[in-house]
């Protein structure tokens, strides 16, 4: 290694893979995390969706070309939910890492800080995508599947982008949360409102009928756009407006998170480390 | 960079948290191949100095250079020459010792094969070769510290910062770690900044910087500081300078 020059591309790749490898190992070691990440959407699918199948009628709305079962409707929402929880879990682990000092070992690396945070984010996205495919495998046994097998492939970029957005949001939150104990608030004030005020469980035209105000909240909710992006991609179509919204939200969250972890102005300084 | 370039140069460094001044115009240097002790009570500003030197956040005033590279302007060059042992335990307890070392190596751009080779050597030096595949959780406090030091040296830095590395260790582990680090200075010419509040870790020939309420009260060889203050030992000098009773280890 030439100590007088910057890093080579290969070294950047080594660093990225190192961070991803560590997240992967941590994930493997926390089997209960994997199981609960899988059980949560399955409970929604097999209990909630089965119960509500008769209550909630879904009219034919894009991308669906025919009436669909409620289980089919909520599957993209549950895929996004897996990613939402994973993003928040990553943020929880970053707060934990900060408290235990592990975050410091990451940030004292000579690689640029934006790259280190980006690597951490990618690692979290990779884990969330694996979780989604594990869920899809189980859903497949219950005949919940895309119109053609290609849907499994076309949904991948949507999952990557939605995962990035939710991971960046988690990273931003992790810089704002002072202590681990405050994390319970994230459940109440971020996860539940984002999930329920979205198109994950019911189409937005139904929400509009009952409350225009709530409809507006749902329409601007980044999670709604993540769900729609995934829903359309699963059906081999692109929801362009959701794509644009997710891209914009991702950029905003990412820039804010990198600023929050920036040595010169970040939140780390304000609280004294 | 010449031999005269200090391993660590701190110049006019000030930092505050809101209205509270944590560091006030602090200047000192750690020469290459020297063992320098940063001595101060809890709250003296040692940890703030550490956070600034490792670029956790930026100094409001003044500069920090590692072998001539400014930590804020050229952080990559500065940080790759630096090894750090934080006060808090920072090994990943769920991972094995080797996995911890390979992860650290990746953060310095060292690939897994080379990292394993370096890791085997590092663990052998730490006397923990046969524990490579054990989880970090299974180690004692002293063993963890030894691994943390081995990890900090894995990318072959020329400057090692240790923030109160002996806190919470028993007497034997403390003595072992101190003598190991002194040996690194003697045998490998490593520059070391050792922060502590424990007087008995200082030898008369050590460079000492006394930090109190964010200000440097004295800097120089321990014996010289003692003599200059008309004290019999560095402990007495410290007590006179800070108005504190001598801090002895628990």
Image (cartoon, helix red, strand yellow):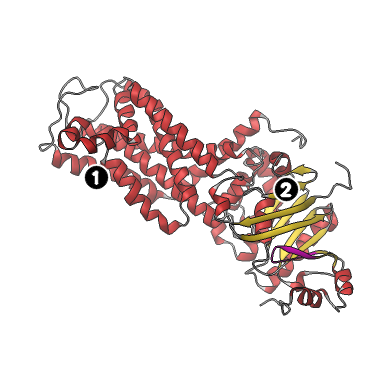
Q: In the rendered view, would you say B146 is above or below B106?
A: below
Which residue lies most toward the front here? B19
Residue that badge 2 annotates: B82
Find numbered disc 2 in the image and state the secondary structure of the residue it sits on. strand
* Quarter residue B236 falls in: bottom right
Q: In the rendered view, would you say B190 is above or below B167?
A: above
* Residue interval drawn in magenta: B209-217
Question: What residue appears at the point 42 percent right and 35 percent down from the top-left corner?
Answer: A165
Q: In the rendered view, would you say B235 is above or below B38?
A: below
Give how far across and how far down residue A202 sits, in percent.
20, 35
Packing grade of label 2 (10 A; few <14, some 14-19, many >=20) is many
Packing grade of label 1 (10 A; few <14, some 14-19, many >=20) is few
Q: Nearer the viewer, mark 1 or mark 2?
A: 2
Question: What residue appears at the point 41 percent right and 33 percent down from the top-left corner?
Answer: A249
* Quarter residue A239 falls in: top left
Give how far across and how far down residue B235 sits, in percent.
79, 76
Left or right: residue B199 compared with residue A37: right
Give how far across and how far down residue B76 sits, in percent.
69, 39
- Residues A171 and B91: in front is A171
Disc number at residue A43? Answer: 1
């Amino acid at each position: 290694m030439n100590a007088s020059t910057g890093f080579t591309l290969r070294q950047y790749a080594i660093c990225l893979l190192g961070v991803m490898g560590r997240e992967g190992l941590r994930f493997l070691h926390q089997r209960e995390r994997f199981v609960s990440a899988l059980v949560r959407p399955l409970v929604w699918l097999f209990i909630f969706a089965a119960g509500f199948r008769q209550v909630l009628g879904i009219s034919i709305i894009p991308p669906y070309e025919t009436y669909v079962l409620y289980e089919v409707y909520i599957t993209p929402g549950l895929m996004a939910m897996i990613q939402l929880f994973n993003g928040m879990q990553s943020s929880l682990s970053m707060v934990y890492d900060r408290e235990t000092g592990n975050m410091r070992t990451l940030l004292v690396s000579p690689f640029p800080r934006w790259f280190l945070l980006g690597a951490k984010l990618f690692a979290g996205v990779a884990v969330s995508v694996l979780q989604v495919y594990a869920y899809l495998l189980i859903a497949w046994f219950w005949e919940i599947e895309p119109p053609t097998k290609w849907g499994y492939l076309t949904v991948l970029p949507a999952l990557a982008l939605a995962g990035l957005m939710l991971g960046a949001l988690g990273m931003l939150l992790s810089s704002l949360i002072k202590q681990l104990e405050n994390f319970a608030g994230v459940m109440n004030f971020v996860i539940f409102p984002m999930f329920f005020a979205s198109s994950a469980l019911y189409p937005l035209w139904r929400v509009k009928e009952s409350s225009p105000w709530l409809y507006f909240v749902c329409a601007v909710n980044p999670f709604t756009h993540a769900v729609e992006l995934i829903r359309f991609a699963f059906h081999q179509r692109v929801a362009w407006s959701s794509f644009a919204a997710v891209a914009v939200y991702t950029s905003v969250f990412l820039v804010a998170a990198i600023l929050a972890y920036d040595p010169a102005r970040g939140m780390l300084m304000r609280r004294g480390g | 960079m010449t031999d005269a370039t200090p391993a660590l140069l701190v110049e006019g460094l000030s930092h505050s948290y809101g209205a509270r001044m944590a560091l006030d115009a602090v200047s000192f240097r750690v020469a290459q191949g020297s063992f320098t002790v940063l001595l101060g009570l809890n709250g003296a500003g040692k940890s703030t100095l550490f956070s600034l030197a490792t670029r956790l956040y930026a100094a409001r005033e003044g500069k920090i250079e590692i072998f001539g590279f400014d930590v804020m302007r050229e952080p990559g060059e500065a940080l790759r020459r630096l090894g750090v042992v934080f006060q808090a335990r920072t090994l990943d307890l769920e991972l094995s010792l080797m996995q911890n070392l390979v992860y650290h190596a990746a953060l310095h751009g060292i690939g897994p094969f080379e990292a394993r080779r370096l890791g085997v050597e590092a663990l052998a030096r730490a006397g923990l070769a046969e524990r490579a595949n054990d989880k970090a959780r299974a180690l004692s406090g002293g063993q963890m510290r030894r691994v943390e030091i081995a990890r900090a040296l894995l990318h072959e830095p020329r400057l090692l910062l240790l923030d109160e590395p002996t806190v919470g260790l028993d007497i034997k582990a403390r003595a072992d770690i101190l003598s190991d680090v002194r040996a690194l200075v003697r045998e490998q010419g490593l520059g070391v900044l050792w922060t502590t509040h424990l007087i008995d870790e200082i030898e008369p020939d050590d460079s000492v910087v006394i930090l109190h309420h964010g200000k440097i009260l004295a800097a120089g060889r321990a014996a010289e500081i003692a003599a200059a203050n008309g004290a019999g030992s560095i402990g007495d000098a410290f007590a006179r300078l800070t108005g504190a009773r001598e801090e002895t280890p628990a």
